[in-house]
Image (tube, rainbow, N blue to C red):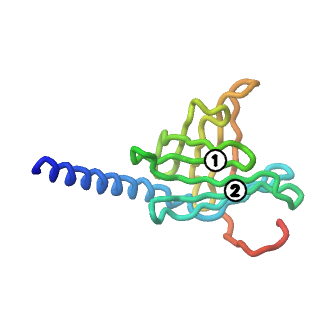
């Protein structure tokens, strides 16, 4: 009976420790919350991240071309079964994929999944208070490939209207 009691206490301590660890990790990601915009040629990409209340950051991304959405993705940064953060990507019209936390600092976060075709790595890096550079990279048919997304902070405005 004593062993069982210590087991429950140990489990409670583990859960509390994991929650505290995640809270520290999420504090490092406060800079990612909000709305971001990148322009690449005739494309406009708008990405929005929620705060981490409840232990979950949710992201949405829409790529516009000529005022129409041509790509979209739902994302989540959430603890995996071991309590470590992972990036879950749900790209429109493609299979979902999970990426394990590789690095986390006060100004960047990187996730990896070497078994995923492309991308194998997803990274966000803060560049001041109003700029984030994100990139995806990994192997491709023509050799290693990296795609950059230079985001600028924008006002979150979810009113229905034409694409700007």
Q: Which residue is drawn at the image coordinates 51% and 51% (left, top)?
A: 107
- Residue 99 sits in which quadrant? top right
User: Can you give x and y, in whole percent of width and height, for residue 88 in the image?
Assistant: 57, 48
User: Can you give x and y, in whole percent of width and height, for residue 94 in the image?
Assistant: 72, 43
Q: Which residue is drawn at the image coordinates 16% and 49% (left, top)?
A: 4
- Residue 123 sits in which quadrant? top right
Image position of 140 with respect to 60: above or below: above
User: Can you give x and y, in whole percent of width and height, for residue 48 in the image?
Assistant: 64, 61
Along the line of sight, the residue nearer the viewer: 160 or 164: 160
Q: Which residue is mark 1?
A: 134
Along the line of sight, the residue nearer the viewer: 30 or 83: 83
User: Can you give x and y, in whole percent of width and height, for residue 156 in the image?
Assistant: 67, 70
Image position of 135 with respect to 22: above or below: above
Along the line of sight, the residue nearer the viewer: 88 or 27: 88
Q: Which residue is drawn at the image coordinates 31% and 54% (left, top)?
A: 15
> Which is more foreground, mark 2 or mark 1?
2
Q: Which residue is mark 2?
A: 61
Along the line of sight, the residue nearer the viewer: 122 or 54: 54
Q: Quadrant of the C terminus?
A: bottom right
């Amino acid at each position: 009976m004593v062993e069982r009691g210590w087991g429950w206490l140990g489990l409670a301590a583990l859960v509390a420790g994991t929650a505290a660890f995640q809270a520290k990790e999420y504090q490092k990601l406060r800079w990612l919350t909000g709305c971001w915009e990148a322009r690449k040629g005739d494309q406009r990409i708008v990405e929005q991240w929620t705060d981490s209340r409840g232990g979950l950051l949710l992201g949405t991304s829409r790529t516009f071309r000529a005022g129409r959405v041509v790509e979209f993705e739902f994302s989540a940064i959430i603890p995996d079964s071991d309590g470590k953060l992972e990036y879950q990507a749900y790209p429109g019209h493609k299979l979902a994929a999970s990426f394990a936390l590789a690095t986390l600092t006060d100004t960047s976060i990187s996730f990896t999944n070497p078994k995923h075709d492309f991308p194998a790595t997803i990274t966000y890096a803060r560049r001041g208070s109003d700029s984030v550079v994100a990139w995806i990279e990994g192997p491709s048919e023509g050799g290693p490939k990296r795609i950059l997304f230079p985001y600028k902070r924008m006002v979150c405005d979810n009113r229905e209207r034409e694409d700007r």
